[in-house]
Amino acid sequence: MKSPAATRALAIVGATVGAILVWVIAHQAVGDLNVKTGDSSQTVSIVAVILTVVFAGLIGWGLLAILERATGKARTIWTVVAVVFLVLSLLGPLGADGTGAKVSLLLMHLVAGAVIIPLFARSTTPR
């Protein structure tokens, strides 16, 4: 059995690799993934994908660690919060230019969430 820290680190790595794979396939299939930011457009780079997944994973890890120290229901609370944030994060890709970019960015969010949420939830330690 892996330690909670090892499980969470592997979850972040797995989510990052999954999002990278989606980005690579999407980049080959539809070209640049552009997102509207106000009046301009920004290209989603592979570096942005990596940094975003790692940052989100670390924020989730931090929240879970705090909840584990504060409550006996850390797993339940964290899972609900994580799912809510995942659903809210799906609004961002809707601003992408083109259907291919929208679908690709939505898939990246879903892949990252599908890896991180269950693995982090399983890694919780009792209070």
Image (cartoon, grey):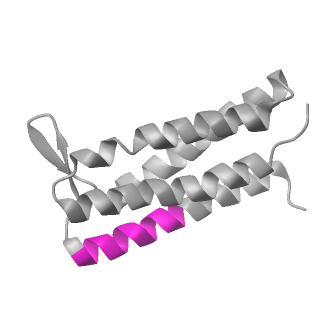
Q: Does 10 sit above or below residue 96? A: below
Magenta stretch, main secondary structure class: helix
In magenta, the rendered stretch is: 16-29
Q: Quadrant of residue 100?
A: bottom left
Closer to the camera, 84 or 59?
Answer: 84
Residue lying farthest top? 70
Indicate left or right for 8 with 103 as reference. Answer: right
Task: Give the residue drawn at x 51%, y 67%.
Answer: 18
Indicate left or right for 54 with 38 as reference. Answer: right
Task: Give the residue drawn at x 43%, y 37%.
Answer: 88
Closer to the camera, 90 or 11?
Answer: 90
Q: Which quadrant: the C terminus? A: top right
Q: Quadrant of residue 14?
A: bottom right
Could you say where residue 86 lies in the image, as x and y percent from the top left? 50, 43
Task: Give the residue drawn at x 64%, y 49%.
Answer: 117
Closer to the camera, 2 or 104?
Answer: 104
Q: Does 49 sit above or below residue 90? A: below
Could you say where residue 31 lies in the image, as x and y percent from the top left? 19, 70
Indicate left or right for 117 with 93 as reference. Answer: right
Could you say where residue 72 lies in the image, as x and y percent from the top left? 87, 28
Task: Give the residue drawn at x 90%, y 62%.
Answer: 1
Task: Determine if the magenta segment contains residue 20.
Answer: yes
Q: Does 90 sit above or below residue 111? A: above
Task: Determine if the magenta segment contains residue 116.
Answer: no
Could you say where residue 123 lies in the image, as x and y percent from the top left? 80, 49
